[in-house]
Image (spheres, grey):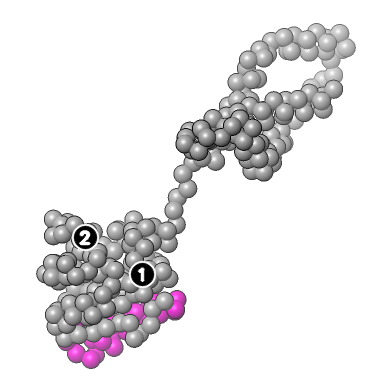
Amino acid sequence: MAEASSKDDLLQLIKRFGAYLTLKMSNFFPISLQNLDSRSVGAIAGFAVAIIFTWRLLRSSNGHQRQQPKRQMPAPSSSTSNVGLNSNEQSIPSGVCSSSEDLRAHNVVDEFFQPVKPTLGQIVRQKLSEGRKVTCRLLGIILEEYSPEDLQKRATVRSSVLEVLLEITKYCDLYLMETVLDDESEKRVLSALEDAGVFTSGGLVKDKVLFCSTENGRTSFVRQLEPDWHIDSNPEIITQLARFIKYQLHVAPIRHERSASNVFSSPSLEQFFGNI
């Protein structure tokens, strides 16, 4: 008898679960479900219940039973036991059980419909609007240094930008570029990028790190490459390229007014992609 009762309870719970799932899906897909007949909607709900949720429901139910502590009670007399059992059965309203079962079904469905957090790779592709070629300045964006004079002393890759940078190289044809004053600065930059592991992913090679002696040289590089996106910290270059490049990102500590509709701004490359 106890086993039959348990099966009936499970059947009722699955029925409530299916009804709520159908309602939830009608809210989630309002147009498509209106065009379906009741048999199609029932099939969708039944399939989702059978494949996705039933095993979780059974698992959570079994886990709950296992977690209940066992209490040993002295064996009561038969007359006392019968009286207590009848009293307990009468004291539990049927509405309470029904509400509890409905709540369990609702909670499982609500958990399934929670929004899924996108991965960094998905965010990069979305932010870049499916652009496949990107050019990016090094100073102040990839490197901690801010001037060509700094590169004559040292070159340091910003650790916070590495994850985003490597994700861009997986999806885009990336070119890094910078103005330098001597050959030693070039070697110093390449060594810093190599030590940081930028070239190990296979998406970026040393031949795609370009150097020039003037800011105008960098502008010329960008126009020749014709990228979908250019990332720079020099507002003058951003302005000059606005009518030639589809999208630009101006990286600056202080947010500037947009010089054009296709120019975006952010305090850092990683903040633009929300990776902070």
Q: Does 193 appear in magenta?
A: yes
Q: Does 267 appear in magenta?
A: no
Q: Work out whether 256 lies above or below 7.
A: below
The magenta span reads 178-202
Residue under the point 15% across and 57% down: 258
Residue under the point 27% across and 68% down: 229
Q: Work out whether 182 lies above or below 27.
A: below
Task: Name the image quarter holding the N terminus.
Answer: top right
Q: Work out whether 153 lies above or below 84.
A: below
Q: Residues within 10 Å of mark 2 (few under 14, many from 20)?
A: some
Q: Where residue 210 appears, x then y in whole percent?
A: 27, 83
Q: Where residue 20 appears, x then y in whole percent?
A: 57, 29
Q: Which residue is mark 2?
A: 262
Residue sitting at the far bottom: 183
Residue under the point 44% across and 79% down: 202
- Residue 108 vs residue 182: left or right? right
- Secondary-structure class at tag 1: loop
**What amino acid type is highlighted by mark number 2?**
Asn
- Mark carried by residue 132: 1
**What amino acid type is highlighted by mark number 1?**
Arg
Q: Where residue 12 appears, x then y in whole percent?
A: 69, 25
